[in-house]
Every structure is written in C-alpha cells, then in structure tokens.
Image (cartoon, helix red, strand yellow):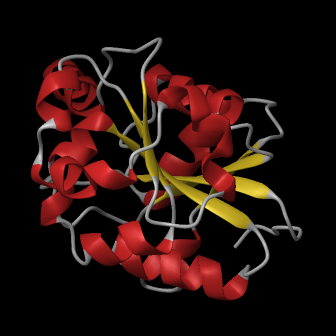
Amino acid sequence: MPPAPPGQRIGLFGGSFDPPHEGHRLVARVVLRRLRLDRLWWIVTPGNPLKDHGRLAPLSERVALSRALVGGDRRIVVTAFEAAHRIRYTADTLELVTSRRPNARFVWIMGADSLRSFHRWQDWKRIAAMMPLAVVDRPGSTLSVLSSPAALRLEGHRIPERDAARLASLDPPAWVFLTGPRSAQSSTTLRRLQDSLS
C-alpha cells in the first residue's frame, strides 16, 4: 500500500483497467484538479465481481499498461495492493486503507456508470458511510445516473459541484457529481476491438 502522510488528500480510483485508456487518465486528472487532491491511488484490482470479463488480462500486464499511460505524473500512484490482501470488494478495500492510513483524507472516485449500479455493490451503504464519493460524468450517463437508486438514497448528502474542492475535508456520507470534459472510450469496446483483430 502506498504511503499517506498525515493530512494528505488522496483519491482512490479503483478498477480492473482491462485495458487502461485515455478516459481513465482524464478522470484521474480531472479529480486531482477539481478536488484539489495531493495524490491519486490508481488501484488495479484483481477482478470485478459485478463484471464478467471472461478472460481478464494478467494483473501485472494491467499494472504495467497503467503505469505507461500515467507516464511521469508523480501525483498518480499505480498500485495493486488488493491482490496481496486477497480483497474482492470495495468496502473491504476502504476498511483496510482507512485502518492502515488513518490520518489521511480519502475520497473514493467512480465513473457515473458505476453509480448507476452502485446499489448492487456489496455493502454499498457502508462504502458511502466510510468515505466521501466523487462521481465523474460519463457520456450517456448523466440523466440515468442521477435517478439511480443509490443517487436517490444519497441525494441529501450531495454537495454542489462548485464546492467540490471541499469534499476531501467532509465527513461521510458526502458526494459530488462532477461534469466537464468526458471521454467516450471504454475498456469493453477496446477489448472487443482487440479480439476482432486477433
């Protein structure tokens, strides 16, 4: 697990990143700027219980591709610590992170497409109670995501987008919906393209 000096504001951006793409990097850069984060942990997960990828690319390959995509941006730390702890669910990741790095201020980062299905995640209410959430808009997701079960349940804890820079200092539950530049790229589409070419 990466270091986290006391008081540091850190975004946790988890996913299978199979493969990582420019849309992921755009999300990372947007949240670093809009949330005024000191660091972003790009967490490459062993797998996603809600997605059936068929054959997932090896973890080491996904980590290497993520590091290459991030390039020299020292604010972004690519890590795969979940595998060493045999973690499958986000709630367990957040519990581990907050217990091991109790003096940092963490924010969980997710795409709007993930919020749409957030109510199906294992212990999603516990996730929302452990850490502020930043939801980044994705093409075609804006209207449906804001009327999703989780968004409606958490509506009273949503802060205005203009206050996004305060999110890391707020006690959960708290969340913000970030609009702005979006990428239409998706890992699913890129995998299908790779499969069709092989």
Image point 25% across, 46% down: which residue? 115
Residue 19 lies left or right of residue 2; in this view the side is: left
Residue 41 lies left or right of residue 122; in this view the side is: right
Tell me if residue 128 comes above or below residue 53 in the rendering.
Answer: below
Residue 145 lies left or right of residue 85; in this view the side is: left
Q: Position of residue 21 (x, y in %)?
A: 45, 27
Question: Which sits in the foreground, 9 or 188?
Answer: 9
Q: Is residue 60 visible?
A: yes
Q: Is residue 198 visible?
A: no
Which residue of the protein is positioned furthest toward the front in this rendering? 156
Image point 64% across, 88% down: which residue? 99
Image point 50% across, 29% down: which residue? 161
Tell me if residue 128 comes above or below residue 136 in the rendering.
Answer: below
Q: Position of residue 89 (x, y in %)?
A: 33, 75
Tell me if residue 138 comes above or below residue 13 in the rendering.
Answer: above
Q: Position of residue 56 (x, y in %)?
A: 28, 54
Q: Position of residue 60 (x, y in %)?
A: 53, 57
